[in-house]
Image (tube, rainbow, N blue to C red):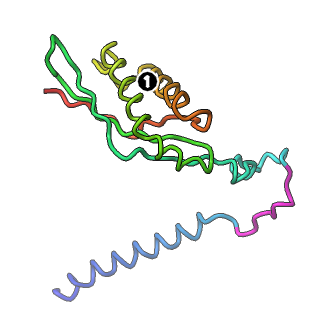
Amino acid sequence: MTVLRKLIPILLALTGLGAGMGAGLALRPAADMPAESDHTETDPKATEAEAVDPEMLPDYVKLNNQFIVPILQDGRVVSMVILSLSLEVLQGTTENVYKREPKLRDVFLQVMFDHANAGGFKGSFTDGANLVLLRKALLEAAVTTLGESVTDVLIVDIVRQDS
């Protein structure tokens, strides 16, 4: 009986392993992918990634530190919003972002303070329309600071801590 108790977990593990391998083999992609020259841009099977030149893909630059924005009410800090941002930039312009990061952080903080003072971080602060306004304002500030090399501002993390 003790031998059976030891064999059952091993048999269950082997059965699970076999089922997983069988499912992996059954669901793997077909091996006969067409060569690049076999399809054209009008081929409906061509994916968007295949149509985009790899040199045209953007770079993503994560800004080094989080942004901390105090939320004031009657002159008192009632909560803090903490954000992490990344920038989508044209390839080869990453170094320029890091060279101008102090200025960029300054203008981003000003945008976030204005957003906070307008009530943007109160209530349902993660509402889609609310974040669209913030992203748009951040993108305008980034383009003003770095030029047209910035194509988007991504809010990677956002947290509000109420006191």
Image vertical order of residue 135 relative to residue 2, above or below: above
Image vertical order of residue 30 relative to residue 91, above or below: below
Quarter of the image that includes the N terminus? bottom left
Which quarter of the figure has residue 107?
top left
Give the dominant element type of the magenta stretch: helix, strand or loop.
loop
Q: Amino acid at mark 1?
A: Leu
Report the residue at 76% width, 50% height from top. 46
Quarter of the image that includes the C terminus? top left
Q: Position of residue 19 (x, y in %)?
A: 46, 71
Which quarter of the figure has residue 104?
top left
Report the residue at 46% width, 76% height from top. 18
Q: Give the extent of the magenta segment.
A: 31-40
Report the residue at 33% width, 75% height from top. 12
Q: How many marks?
A: 1
Q: Position of residue 82 (x, y in %)?
A: 28, 34
Question: Label 1: which residue?
Answer: 134
Report the residue at 85% width, 55% height from top. 39
* Other-residue count near label 1 (Cα within 10 Å), few / some / many at <14 / 14–19 / ≥20: many
Q: Position of residue 38 (x, y in %)?
A: 86, 60
Give yes or no for residue 76 being in the magenta stretch: no
Q: Position of residue 134 (x, y in %)?
A: 43, 24
Give yes or no for residue 36 being in the magenta stretch: yes
Image vertical order of residue 5 relative to residue 71, above or below: below
Image vertical order of residue 4 relative to residue 80, above or below: below
